Amino acid sequence: MKTICFYFQVHQPYRLRRYRFFDIGENHNYFDDFANRSIMRKVAEKCYLPTNQLFLDLINEYGCKFKISYSISGTAIDQFEQYAPDVLDSFKRLADTGCVEFISETYSHSLSAIKNESEFKKQVELHKKKIELHFNQTPKVFRNTELIYSDTIGTLVADMGYKAMLSEGAKHVLGWKSPNYVYTNAVNPRLKLLLKNFTLSDDIAFRFSNRAWEEWPLTTEKYISWLNAIDEKEEIVNLFMDYETFGEHQWAETGIFEFMRHLPYKVFSDTNFEFLIPSEAAEKHQPIAPMHVPHPISWADEERDLTAWLGNDLQDEAFDKLYSLIDKVQMISKEELLRDWKYLQTSDHFYYMCTKWFSDGDVHKYFNPYDSPYEAFINFMNVLSDFTLRLEREVMNNRNQDMLSTYTPEEIKKLIGEYEQKLTELKSVFDKNSNDSSKKEIYS
Amino acid sequence: MRVLMFGWEFPPHITGGLGTACYGLVKGLAKNNVEVLFVVPKAYGDEDNSVVKIVDASEIELNQDTLSTDDFWRKVTFMEVGSSLIPYVSPEEFKRISSMDILDQTKLKQTIFRSKYKFSGKYGRDLMEEVSRYAVIAAALAVKNNFDVIHAHDWLTYAAGIAAKSVSKKPLVIHVHATEFDRSGENVNQNVYDIERKGMEAADRVITVSNYTRNIVINRYGIDASKVVTVHNAVEFDSRKNGHDEQKTVPEKVVTFLGRITFQKGPDYFVEAANMVLQKYNNVRFVMAGSGDMLNRIIKRVAELQISDKFHFTGFLKGNDVNRMFLQSDVYVMPSVSEPFGISPLEAMRANVPVIISKQSGVAEVLNHAIKIDFWDIDAMADAMYGLLNYDGLPTMFRRMGQEEVLNLKWENAARKINEIYQTAL
């Protein structure tokens, strides 16, 4: 039997509030509570709650014959806790069915994989704990932010004990190869790769409601016929998409919910496909070849590269300045600072600085709080400046604390006396020397 | 396609941006195979004749036959306005001129209809008389010449455009580079406003230099939106190198305001934003280049804020001094309250200076690589200045992208659109 593997990305960033330079050093509250809350509530009502209910209904109807998987970023879960506990509960109900797999990623949906190995691992670990806490399962499969993947990242992920990883299967990544097989990492063949079937995924995620599309309207029957038209020998169709596709990118009025509601029944009755979760799919299908990806790829835009997040001067400066703090961050343990550090790494901040959308894609404008990438950059840098100040102060405090734990106040007093005496000695030697040499210059 | 075009000035004899824009436009039209007969009140003989035939209105002799027809008289009567109306001069000069009480109606009537009339071609005290006389000449020219479309630039030439249209029955295109609301805020001069509205109403097509101006034309003048079309201005740069070897003279970064120091250019907002930046950041100087009726008030405010050691005035700059100012600048700010287009940010970008521009400007509609703020939002303005001064990625990015963006604003493209508008007017 062939496999359909559904995977949904659930993510919300902590959007920054308008943070002016006068706030630097004065005000340490960076996040736009109002915007984050209202966007979360809006998406919850339009997408998360009705879609979760739909999938819960389908699982109740078909049992574990119908299966799906999610990766929910740590920042999204934090926002569920804060603003939408009802959504978190409905995801827990889905987890309780045993038919839903939760996938690992970086806690803050960050780009740390391409910058810093230890930070990356730390974030994955944090996310894993969060998933275990809420959903009672330990993730076995990994997917990186926006499906960013390279041979190096794959190796890293394999070393962390994951069996499989999700990535993009676009034409110019795969060449003549088909995404409808399981592949492996080019260095470590034990890590299996599930690749997004971008045509069939995007038919649902992007084109579903597009009236200019020649296939509009997309019915379940039509979609089933496309699934059946796939080459005999091909084994797996990976349908990866943003969860917000349901009800948010494609409004309820487009019929997207009805489409999904009927899909499982039609798949069971009219095809030889079954639904599997990523860990099962990776287990079941034999890998056909290693996939070579020397340079990182992603699922974004036409180019499927990283230029949506990195590459222009704004993004590069912000990114480099942020990660230049990493040594100092490792020296501190203060909760609020570590939380802000996580939230500032979220890839969306860099996405807002992208200048490509002057020419392409209103996709980038989706929930973008800024009028221009320049505004996004200035705002982020102001916040980062304040964060840097706080971080440095904290590091300094820690150092002082260390001193205090090493020495008693009396000892410190004594040390000061000794050093002051030494200083006076050194100064007098120096003054004498420089007087002599300047005299020499005058007379010579 | 032949166009009878009325302007008020033509390079090299210019006082404002209008002449430069006309020159660019005419050259662009030539590339689109449009032949232009360009009329100015006074020609000096050293204008560039290679792309356009310059007609000197001062040399046109009025034919008594034309003048004696009833039809002609009816068309030109509305121009008998006797107000002391002098735009484009400083208020001080205005006071001086109006106290001389020169523009009385009887004199106006006598002088307009001499058979030859020496225009000054300036924005002087006989302006209204010149405007009226210009219209009479326009009618005479319209009889003598062969053309398909009439094109008139700004209110000084609208009367000429209307007169030419009524004589020739050819379509009239009015080109709005600025409105009375841009020049005077809410205290509009009723006479100018009336002439502007008559011109727009009589026109078959109205071209505006931005959507910002288009909205003013539609909403404030009540003009039918379907005949108002935006064609953004372009800019043409000297290909000559402009002294790039010059060094910065101060160690600090420099933030510059360059323009008339008048209400509509928003210099007061610049001062307030500068003050905010200086509270946080010391490695910077602010320069206000230009002159105008608000200068004294601004100087007082700067003193009151006690930032005079960091805030400098250069007076009016022209020619190469403007370029030298750009070379000294790290940030250029145009906080205009109302700006139909605004060419100076483009010049700054061309000189590799990142720009902050107000959203109340036409140029904001064509630029991506600029920071756009509301003129009244001094918080945002200060924040943008601070960002450009502190975060290197920003100026680097602007320099890389800005040059190309500015160089892509070509008159040839604007002229192509205008040629299409001619076609629809025929």
Image (cartoon, coloured by chain):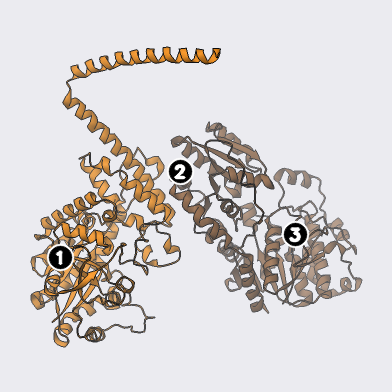
Chain colours: A orange, B brown
Q: How many marks?
A: 3
Q: CA distance from mark 3 to mark 1?
A: 76 Å
Vertical order, B30 against B332 (above or below): below
Q: Position of residue A408 (x, y in %)?
A: 17, 20
Q: Position of residue A204 (x, y in %)?
A: 28, 76
- Residue in the foreground of this view, choosing between B263 and A349: A349
Mark 3 burial class by Cα count in 10 Å: few <14, some 14-19, many 20+ = many
- Residue in the foreground of this view, choosing between B241 and B317: B241
Identify the element where label 1 is drawn: loop
Mark 2 burial class by Cα count in 10 Å: few <14, some 14-19, many 20+ = many
Vertical order, A328 against B53 (above or below): above
Q: Residue at x 19, y 81 (%)?
A: A262
Q: Which residue is mark 1?
A: A190
Q: Which residue is mark 2?
A: B386
Please state which of the two labelled residues, at mark 2 or mark 1, is closer to the viewer: 1
Is B284 left, or right, of A327 in this rendering? right
Is A169 left, or right, of A5 in this rendering? right
Q: Position of residue A440 (x, y in %)?
A: 51, 13
Vertical order, B108 against B60 (above or below): above
Is A324 left, or right, of A139 in this rendering? right
The reply to whether dot 2 and dot 1 touch (C-beta < 8 Å) is no
Judge whether residue A42 can be spotted in this image: no
Do discs 2 and 3 share a chain? yes
Q: Residue at x 75, y 60 (%)?
A: B8
Is A80 left, or right, of B176 in this rendering? left
Q: Quadrant of the N terminus of chain B?
A: bottom right
Q: Which residue is mark 3?
A: B10
Q: CA distance from mark 2 to mark 1?
A: 51 Å
Vertical order, B172 against A412 (above or below): below
Q: CA distance from mark 2 to mark 3?
A: 40 Å
Identify the element where label 3 is drawn: loop
Q: Quadrant of the C terminus of chain B?
A: bottom right
